[in-house]
């Protein structure tokens, strides 16, 4: 019963490098999203998707790209890493209604030096 | 911008005591949810309360909602050391599906 799986768990990047954070869910959820969590700031929405082929920006999308080619996968790409992107990143999925719970992965801790 | 604000930021209590956390929000909502986060893990859904509900219970959890004050509270009764975690409220203030807005959370420490 995997739920939402995120890889890697930890990553260190140098400024300017690019990388992809992976997210996969096995609950057949149409809705998926990416949040970043910074101390004292709660979670902020980066990008979201309401189904395969559909993505849109959240509150803090700059410096990140997403794609949704399948229902299961929703990767987050950092185009050119900056120290300000040092954070913990969470992927979540849900049935799409605000009366349904979000299911979260265990996060990726990213450090950009 | 943050929709929800939890209060207090941190709370330390003894095992067996009750813990109360508050959440305030700014715009109208349809639903409010509470989540728990253990250290180093993702958030886990605890309970949902709809805008037309005033109180809801689930085991040792009691949630209240006051839409006139735009606030909610989460009460954990008879706390245990295993309840040590951060607790977040989430609102659907975006009014778009599951684009929830999370507050900064309350860090609860339950001392044995």
Image (spheres, coloured by chain):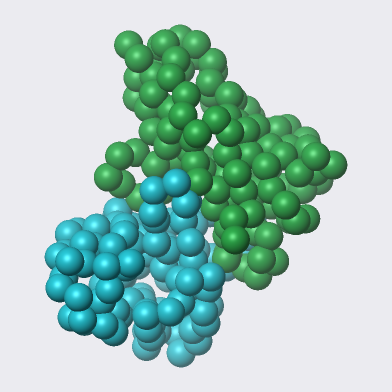
Chain colours: A cyan, B green
Q: Quadrant of the C terminus of chain B?
A: top left
Numbered disc total: 0
* Residue B1 percent coordinates (x, y): 60, 61
Identify the residue at image location x=77%, y=55%. Answer: B28
Residue at the limit of the structure toward the right, as seen here: B68
Say left or right for B30 vs B14. Answer: right
Say left or right for A43 vs A100. Answer: left
Q: Is residue B34 above or below residue B21?
A: below
* Residue A78 percent coordinates (x, y): 29, 79
Identify the residue at image location x=43%, y=33%. Answer: B107
Q: Quadrant of residue A35?
A: bottom left
Q: Is residue A97 above or below residue A68?
A: above
Say left or right for B93 vs A56. Answer: right
Taking the image as drawn, is residue A6 in sight? no
* Residue B52 percent coordinates (x, y): 81, 46
- State the residue in front, A43 or B41: A43
Identify the residue at image location x=35%, y=50%. Answer: B42
Taking the image as drawn, is residue A44 in sight? yes
Identify the residue at image location x=70%, y=66%. Answer: B95
* Residue B97 percent coordinates (x, y): 62, 68
Q: Quadrant of residue A46?
A: bottom left
């Amino acid at each position: 019963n995997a739920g939402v799986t995120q890889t890697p768990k930890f990553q260190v990047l140098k400024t300017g490098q690019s990388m992809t954070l992976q997210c996969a869910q096995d609950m057949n959820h149409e809705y998926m999203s990416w949040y970043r969590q910074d101390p004292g700031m709660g979670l902020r929405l980066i990008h979201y998707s309401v189904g395969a082929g559909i993505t849109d920006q959240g509150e803090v999308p700059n410096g990140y790209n997403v794609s949704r080619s399948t229902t299961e996968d929703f990767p987050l790409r950092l185009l050119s890493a900056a120290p300000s992107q040092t954070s913990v990143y969470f992927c979540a999925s849900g049935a799409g209604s605000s009366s349904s719970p979000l299911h979260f992965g265990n996060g990726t801790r990213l450090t950009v030096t | 911008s943050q929709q929800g604000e939890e209060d207090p930021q941190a709370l330390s209590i003894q095992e067996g005591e009750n813990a109360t956390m508050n959440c305030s929000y700014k715009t109208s909502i349809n639903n409010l949810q509470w989540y728990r986060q253990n250290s180093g893990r993702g958030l886990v859904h605890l309970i949902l309360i709809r805008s037309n509900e005033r109180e809801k219970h689930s085991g040792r959890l009691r949630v209240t909602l006051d839409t006139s004050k735009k606030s909610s509270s989460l009460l954990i009764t008879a706390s245990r050391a295993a309840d040590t975690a951060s607790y977040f409220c989430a609102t659907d203030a975006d009014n778009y599906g599951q684009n929830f807005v999370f507050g900064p959370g309350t860090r609860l420490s339950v001392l044995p």
